[in-house]
Amino acid sequence: MKDPGLDVIRLNGARVLVTGGTGKLGRQLVSALCDAGARVSALTRSPDTASRLWPATGVDCRYGDLAVPNSLPEALKDIELVFHLASYSPRPDEPDIYEALSHWSVTADGTRHLVDAAVAAGVAGLIYFSSVKAMGDMAGAEGRPADESTPARPETLYGRAKLEAEHGILQAGSNGLLHACVLRLPMVYGLDGAGNLYRMIDAVACGRFPPWPRVTNRRSALHVRDAISAAMLVATDRRAAGQTYLVTDGSEYSTRWIYEQIRLALGLAIPAWTLPLWSWRLAAQVGTAAERLTGKPMPLTMAALSKLAGDAWYGSGKIREELSFVSHHRLDTEIPKMVHAYRIKSGHPAAG
């Protein structure tokens, strides 16, 4: 795994375990690691089902459950490097997805179990895919891009669980027990028909997204391939040991700009009128009340509106300066590609 005489780690031939490998991001990471020559295993509670995702790549699907500590030692046998993506995925009918109690048991406690087992197994490195939610929404809404020095004050159980997981991984790294690094990711796109941006494309195409007001907000984003490139970079560079990095594509985007780019890619004209923000807020208040009364998720709530209208602005200068990380994807070129893929998948040409 380590190249003698060089301060780098080689992926080619390394025995790697990916948790959360069956997710949209995880699947692409597994494929990229296979392409890099790594010997890849995927941690899963359903090995037979997971093995069908990579029928011809030789991925070793190993049984393991983060909530069951004694299931992990066997899964980590002979593993040199772990990419940890696994977290709790709320059910579609859960209204408050960021407050689901299982976030703590899976993300915080589960990561602690994984770290303990990895250290005991002699794993050399552990790379954690975290989220800007670990910093709290207010961190990205201060009128300037938040960076790694911005205090982390997560407001949600999801964010607190992510931050707790980060602390456990970095603590193990600080003890010299393994090469540990944390990546905090903003909105990730390019996930093969999943994610907030894809849902927005669908809503605009189907006429469910009225003309968004000309609100100037700033949101950061990252293409899935750049997220993977960053993970593979920090896994193979000793300078990343013990570090936390924010990773973005280096640009910031307003919801209005994204809305217009989606319409143009769909071949739709930009409406001359907009639905004022107060009307969106009124509809979001109704949606929030309905969600509380019925226990069912609503398409527009105050939390969803906050994402659309607010800032989520983060800087990735640290990883660029320290490790020369370069992002190769931007939304101006990727939105047309996503719309094209959406049309193929949905068979929906566009809404008038």
Image (cartoon, rainbow, N blue to C red):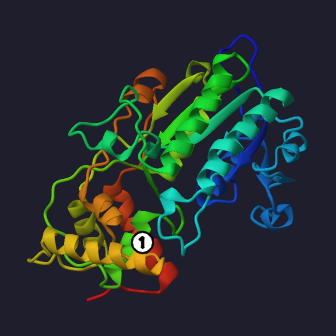
Residue 215 position within the rendered picture, expressed as x and y whole percent measured from the top left: 15, 59
Side of 187 where 106 appears, left or right: right
| In the rendered image, the vertical position of residue 337 relative to residue 162, given as above or below | below
Q: Residue at point 71% right, 29% down? A: 125
Q: Nearer the viewer, residue 190 or 103?
A: 103
Q: In which quadrant is the C terminus drawn? A: bottom left
**Label 1 crowd (10 A; few <14 / some 14-19 / many >=20):** few
Q: Secondary structure at mark 1?
A: helix
Per the image, the residue denoted by label 1 is: 199
Residue 10 position within the rendered picture, expressed as x and y whole percent measured from the top left: 71, 28
Residue 85 visible to an observer of this rendering? no
Quadrant of the rendered image containing residue 100 = bottom right
Q: Residue at point 34% right, 62% down? A: 303
| In the rendered image, the vertical position of residue 266 relative to residue 114, given as above or below | below
Residue projecting furthest to the bottom: 352
Q: Nearer the viewer, residue 200 or 321?
A: 200
Q: In which quadrant is the N terminus drawn? A: top right
Quadrant of the rendered image containing residue 53 = bottom right
Side of 296 where 110 appears, left or right: right
| In the rendered image, the vertical position of residue 4 relative to residue 157, given as above or below | above
Residue 248 position within the rendered picture, expressed as x and y whole percent measured from the top left: 40, 42
Residue 174 visible to an observer of this rendering? yes
Q: Nearer the viewer, residue 230 or 147?
A: 147
Q: Residue at point 21% right, 70% down? A: 281
| Kind of residue indicated by mark 1 | Arg
